[in-house]
Each structure stands twice: as structure tokens, then as C-alpha cells.
Amino acid sequence: MNYLSWNENIITEISYLKKLFVVTAFISLSISAIFGISILILGNFGETQQKLLITTVLFGAFSILGITHSISGQKRQLLPIRVLGIVSSAGALLILLSALWSLVEIRELSWKIIFTLILLSGMSAHVSLLSMIRRPNWMIKAWYYFAVIVPFLVVAWILGHIWSLMSFDDGTFFRYLGSIHILDVLGTVGIFPLSRIYGKLAGK
């Protein structure tokens, strides 16, 4: 009983943090939009204003990713993936902004870390959006799991190449990457007509 109570408290706190994060991300996105428009209309595009404009673009892009991570049709099951996405987004944004304002020097390792964080963040957003699809029967559920697994394969394949965990020539790497990416697109696009057609049949 104590364990169940503790578990519920953790879930409640996480839910509160998620709402706080969504509100913060939305405010950040709104401020970035206003700031960016102001620079585009009134600015003279000096070096500092260019950096400020890029900063607003980065804040806007990662705010959108952050909001995407926070919405999910499977709150408990996808919690680790969503947390991974939020942390990855924040980490990538912090490194990019630090490099933009010359607070850190970007080296080859830094680029690998940035690409890794962006890939993990994008994968998390992808899976979170897919989880919003209703899955009333086994066919849509099976396609959903297929559509969710493939993004993991895409990210794993790219990261394996970036971090030199796999030794393939460029031709072989891109052949397999293209094949996996086609499956990714098929899984993502295919689930929508399936949910519309077979979801309605199940509803009847």
C-alpha cells in the first residue's frame, strides 16, 4: 500500500512538472515569436541581432519539440521516452546557444553530442505524436507498434555510424538508412488511413 501511494505521488508530481513545462515552453515560444518579428521588421541585421534572431529560432524550434514531448496518449508507458526527449532537447539547446554566443568551442565531439541529442529529441517527439492515435483493434495496434519501433531503428543506425560503432562504407550505410527511413514513412503515414477505416469499423 505504501508503495502504491508513493508511486501515485511520483506520478502526480511528474504530471505537475509536465504542465509547468508545457506552460514554460508555450511562453518561450510566444516570446521568441514576438522577438523574432521585432528583429525582422525593425532590426538592421548586425552581428548581435543576427545572433539574437538565431537564438529566437532555436528557442522556438526546441519549444515546439518540448510541447510535443509532453503530449502523449500513453502517459505512463511512454514516460521514460518523453523524459529522454525533454532532457535531450534542453541539452541540445544549451550547447547550441553556448556555441552561438562563443561561450564554448565546438569540436568534433561536441557536434556528435549535439546530433545525438537532436536525434533522440526528434525520435521522442515522433513517438509521442504517434501515441495519440486511437487503437481500437489488433490491426491498428500491430501497425502502431511497427510505426513506433522503426524510428528507434533509424536513430540507432545513425548513432551507430556517428559514434563509429559500426564499420560500413558510405554506400552501404545510406542504402540501409534509406530503406529504414522508407519503412519509417510508411509506418507513420499508413497508421492514419488505417485508424480512420478500421477504427470506424470497430466503432460500428
Image: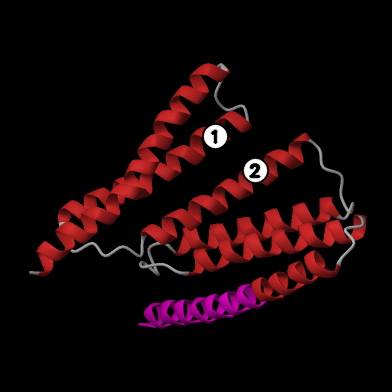
The residue located at (30%, 50%) in the rendering is: 145
Q: What residue is disc 2 on?
A: 115
Q: Residue pushed farthest left?
A: 204
**Which of the labelled discs sits on residue 189, or is there none?**
none
Q: Position of residue 135 (x, y in %)?
A: 23, 62
Whether 90 is drawn above or below 23: the answer is: above
Callout 1: SS: helix
One can see residue 168 in this view:
no
The residue located at (36%, 37%) in the rendering is: 183
For the residues bearing labels 2 and 1, Cβ distance under 8 angstroms: yes
Q: 130 or 14: which is nearer to us? A: 130
The residue located at (54%, 34%) in the rendering is: 158
Q: Who comes first in sequence, dot 2 or dot 1? A: 2
Residue type, label 1: Ile
Q: Position of residue 66 (x, y in %)?
A: 57, 65
The residue located at (57%, 28%) in the rendering is: 165
Residue type, label 2: Phe
Please rate how many residues cluster around mark 1, counting C-alpha atoms within 10 Å: few if below 14, some from 14 to 19, many from 20.
some
| Range drawn in magenta | 1-27
Q: What residue is disc 1 on?
A: 158
Q: Position of residue 38 (x, y in %)?
A: 79, 71
Q: Position of residue 147 (x, y in %)?
A: 34, 47
